[in-house]
Image (tube, rainbow, N blue to C red):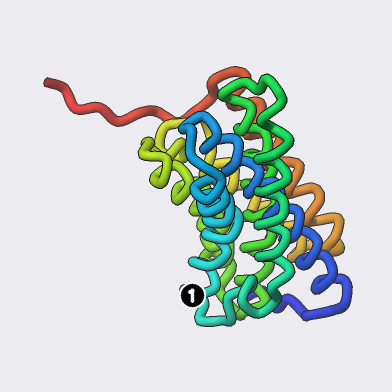
């Protein structure tokens, strides 16, 4: 069991990491749904689900207050970023794969934030790391299901794997006495860079396929 003392640094780091995660994840929801030709309401719903879904599931599993209900600034930020990006992106020519960049950033930030929250709630280290994966990946899963597509976490290179390794790395750094802020930055950047490299070079786990 890792005892993560709740300090001002920890609370501040968690707040800002979660805020960034909500913004970039909501952005990925807007950009992904934009190619499905949904109206503003549909885009906003998908953006909010993407930005808040993973953290909501984490908090319910940990039996703690849902973060965006406890502090509505997260809901406001998700809603605002969705509307702003919806308006701004309509006048730009954007690749259908561009959403993968904010998606990778959201995966990284939410994985670290999810691990932090789970440790603060008293979860064992392995469960805390998996809560990081759930927080990082579930918003994207909800987004893809609402867009009537197979979630990219199940078929895209090193998605949940990168999140889990990064979450475990964060725990190792914390347990080694590294500050929360430094640990979060190192772990988050590791997840983000690993995900982008996996996309660039198509790195992934072996795929399961039954012989016919």
Give x and y (percent) for residue 186.
Answer: 79, 47
| Whether residue 157 is situated above or below residue 118 in the rendered picture | above
Q: Which quarter of the rendered picture does the C terminus lie within?
A: top left
Please report the residue visible at 53 percent of the width from the left and 39 percent of the height from the top: 159
Give the residue number, with chain letter if any, for mark 1. 60
- Residue 158 seen in the current view: yes
Please report the residue visible at 59 percent of the width from the left and 67 percent of the height from the top: 125
Give x and y (percent) for residue 138.
Answer: 49, 53
Left or right side of 15 for 192: left
- What is the quadrant of residue 123 in the picture? bottom right
Label 1, residues with CA under 10 Å away: few <14, some 14-19, many ≥20: few
Q: Which quarter of the rendered picture does the N terminus lie within?
A: bottom right
Please report the residue visible at 49 percent of the width from the left and 75 percent of the height from the top: 60
Residue 17 or residue 88, whichever sits in front: 88
- Residue 164 seen in the current view: no
Give x and y (percent) for residue 100.
Answer: 61, 32
Left or right side of 196 for 13: right
Please report the residue visible at 68 percent of the width from the left and 20 percent of the height from the top: 93
Residue 136 or residue 37, whichever sits in front: 37
| Whether residue 84 is situated above or below residue 110 in the rendered picture | above
């Amino acid at each position: 069991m890792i005892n993560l003392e709740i300090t001002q640094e920890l609370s501040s780091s968690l707040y800002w990491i979660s805020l960034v995660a909500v913004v970039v994840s909501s952005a990925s929801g807007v950009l992904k749904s934009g190619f499905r030709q949904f109206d503003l309401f549909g885009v906003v719903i998908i953006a909010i689900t993407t930005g808040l879904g993973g953290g909501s599931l984490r908090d319910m599993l940990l039996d703690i207050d849902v973060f965006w209900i406890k502090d509505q600034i997260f809901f406001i930020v998700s809603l605002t970023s969705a509307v702003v990006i919806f308006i701004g992106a309509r006048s730009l020519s954007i690749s259908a794969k561009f959403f993968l960049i904010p998606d990778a950033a959201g995966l990284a930030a939410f994985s670290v934030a999810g691990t932090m929250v789970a440790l603060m709630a008293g979860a064992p280290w392995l469960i805390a790391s998996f809560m990081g994966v759930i927080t990082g990946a579930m918003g994207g899963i909800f987004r893809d299901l609402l867009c009537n597509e197979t979630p990219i976490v199940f078929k895209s290179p090193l998605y949940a794997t990168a999140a889990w390794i990064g979450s475990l790395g964060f725990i190792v750094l914390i347990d080694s006495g590294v500050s929360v802020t430094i640990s979060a930055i190192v772990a988050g950047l590791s997840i983000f860079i690993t995900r982008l490299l996996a996309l660039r070079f198509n790195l992934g786990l072996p795929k399961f396929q039954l012989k016919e």
